[in-house]
Image (cartoon, rainbow, N blue to C red):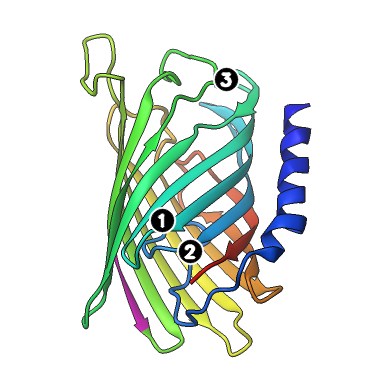
Amino acid sequence: MRIKSLKVWIFIYSVFIIPVLSAPGNEERPVHPNLNQELAVYNKIYVSGTATDRTPRQEDGYERDRKLSAAGEIKFTDSFSVTASYGYVDHYATTRKIWSGWDRWAVGVKYYVKTDLASFGGGVQFFGPSVSQPKEADINPDLFLIRAYFGALKRFGAFSIQTTANFESETNSSGKETAEENFKRFLYSGLTLSYSLTSKTNLLLEFSHRTTVSNTITPYSDYFVVAPGVQYPINQNGYLTFSLLWQTRTDSNIDRGFKIGYLHFFGD
């Protein structure tokens, strides 16, 4: 019932509210990645759905995830913005508990600066507990997450390149590890190559990598995903987005998947 209500809300918002928002005036807006962390600051709403699965393995079985999410961002200056996101997850596994429910909420701040050499961006995101996920021996959904990131963006005419590095750590309300809580930490890196056609269609090729810093959750915690994608303009304000997710490693929690969404910009 809750997932149906969320879908209805997103449909009403996309059809009746988003189209009346003002069009952006900056035609040189940096291309927004479909998959990786974006660096530039925007006035935007991004509603997306992601589906991934993993081929059954003797050690860790079969897993499948379906996620519906909505992310928003508001610029306060040309260099500073705040972000927020929420979503719904449906998880199926043969060797873990099956669950579905609301995803972690997240809020964050971003800073972006342009120089003659390139543009640089960074920020911090704070994720709340995963209230719907069951607690297991190696997973504590009650912990918060903190993610810090930094990267660079360079445009060469219609072509642009974006690189990012993210560090993520679990934490509790005090921000300190205890003997009972062993925080898990990850390093993320992303590369987004994009080319803008004269029709304003953006072609993307993204690479996303995750590796554990310590305390691996499962043997398949790490991944390296290649994601060819496209952003197709359907009106003056928004794009339909689509990316295929291809896994290049066998020791990963993702084998294949896709992400589809609607990306809408408003304001200047």
Q: Earlier in the sequence, mark 2 or mark 3?
A: 2
Specify the amino acid type for callout 1: Gln
Specify the amino acid type for callout 2: Pro
The secondary structure type at the circle numbered 2 is: loop
Q: CA distance from mark 3 to mark 1?
A: 29 Å
Foreground tag (3 vs 1): 1
Q: Earlier in the sequence, mark 3 or mark 1?
A: 1
User: How would you rate the neighbour count of disc 3 (Cα within 10 Å): few for under 14, some for 14-19, many for 20 or more?
Assistant: some
The secondary structure type at the circle numbered 1 is: loop
User: How would you rate the neighbour count of disc 1 (Cα within 10 Å): few for under 14, some for 14-19, many for 20 or more?
Assistant: many
| Residue at 21 percent of width and 20 percent of height | 176
The number of callouts visible is: 3
Q: CA distance from mark 2 to mark 1?
A: 7 Å
Specify the amino acid type for callout 3: Arg
In the image: residue 10, left or right of residue 25: right
Label 3 with label 1: CB-CB less than 8 Å: no
Q: CA distance from mark 2 to mark 3?
A: 32 Å
Decide whether the magenta segment is chiefly helix, strand or loop.
strand
Label 2 with label 1: CB-CB less than 8 Å: yes
State which region is magenta.
151-155
In the image, is residue 107 part of the stretch drawn in magenta? no
User: How would you rate the neighbour count of disc 2 (Cα within 10 Å): few for under 14, some for 14-19, many for 20 or more?
Assistant: many
Label 2: which residue?
Answer: 33
Label 3: which residue?
Answer: 96
| Residue projecting furthest to the top | 180
Residue 20 screen position, x and y as percent:
69, 64
Residue 31 screen position, x and y as percent:
47, 72
| Residue at 51 percent of width and 79 percent of height | 25
| Residue at 41 percent of width and 89 percent of height | 157
The secondary structure type at the circle numbered 3 is: loop
Label 1: which residue?
Answer: 37
